[in-house]
Image (cartoon, helix red, strand yellow):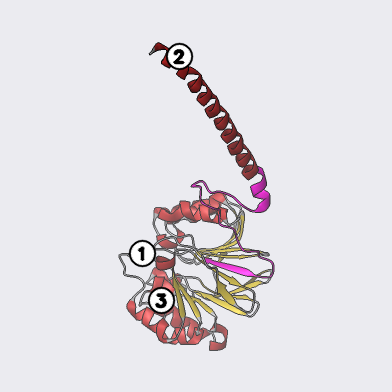
Amino acid sequence: MANNTHLRRPKKSSGGARFTVVTFVVLIVVALCYLGYTYLAPMLGIGLTETGSETRQPVTLDGEMQLHVIDVGQGDSTLIMSKDGIVLVDAGPGSAEDSLVEYLKDVGITTIDYAIFTHPDEDHIGGADVVINNFEVKNVIMPNATKTTKTFEKMIEAIEQSNANVIEATSGASYTLGDIAFRILAPNKASYSATNNYSVVVKLTYGNNTFMLTGDAESESESEILAKYPASELRADFLKVGHHGSSTSTSTAFLTAVSPSIASISCGEDNKYNHPHRETIEKLQGANIKVYRTDLLSTIVFVCDGNTISVVEK
């Protein structure tokens, strides 16, 4: 027995040596991969988020614009990107503020030329203070409307502490950002009983394509827009459906005037408001409008070259 045990010892020693060599090789390979990924990946436009998933990479912006309908749950946030600058419309609820900031950083945002906070409801400005604190925001457009909430106070404090230029939303005012042009169509009154009707409504133009972004504007505000502007100025290829698809917005008259071919709806999955409402979906379907919903698709990215609008497939 002693001899047999003695004969086995060299085999154990040999196996251990082979294990050591294999382990050493594996460690070298891992180290090389790490170094290569750390230093080569940024040059190749590849990266990892903190969770280890692939970094979202924007499509090249030369000669085109991107519109990101960001999934912030039951809320609103729309990002417009072009080589000439960045526009952010709303910042979702506070519950999504961290994921919103992460998303903006993932797609390469450092500066926001215009942040439009359509109205002071939490599901549209909940992440406003965090956005302002994490990015250079040059201009803030907002209506002359206040709300006695901690969320609103935090947004105002963040704006005051930043160097942002604050612009009161005025119906008819126009702005340009390189090839992007946008015009404010609402609000059209000094005061409203419903906060939603303070919503800043924007018509954005890029080349021959047009986009109508409506915040939570309800039928009252839509009627005022219809009364003030001719139908020829309201026509748009794309409609961000008002108030998360609620039946209080997207009146038949307004939808007919805008006459989009594409629409997006921002709402949370299984939300307590039952958004979007059946009446609104039926209107959109009846008009043969292609509808994209964040509760079904998560974040949706549209790419526009000035003549056509397409969806980035995931």
Tell whether label 1 touches label 2 (CB within 8 Å). no
Query: What span is in magenta?
Result: 39-68
Residue at 40% across, 67% down: 296
- Quadrant of image for the N terminus: top left
Residue 225 placement (x, y as % from top left): 49, 81
Q: Mark 1 highlights which residue?
A: 269
Q: Nearer the viewer, residue 214 or 68?
A: 68
Q: In this picture, is 32 found above or below 235? A: above
Q: What residue do we see at 67% from left, 52% from top?
A: 44
Q: Residues within 10 Å of mark 3 (few under 14, many from 20)?
A: many
Reading the chain from its start, which is encountered first: label 2 or label 1? 2
Numbered circle sitting on residue 218: 3
Q: Nearer the viewer, residue 211 or 54?
A: 54
x and y, in percent, of residue 135 in the image: 58, 52
Amino acid carrying mark 3 in the image: Glu
Label of residue 6 in the image? 2
Disc 2 marks a residue whose amino acid type is His
Q: Residues within 10 Å of mark 1 (few under 14, many from 20)?
A: some
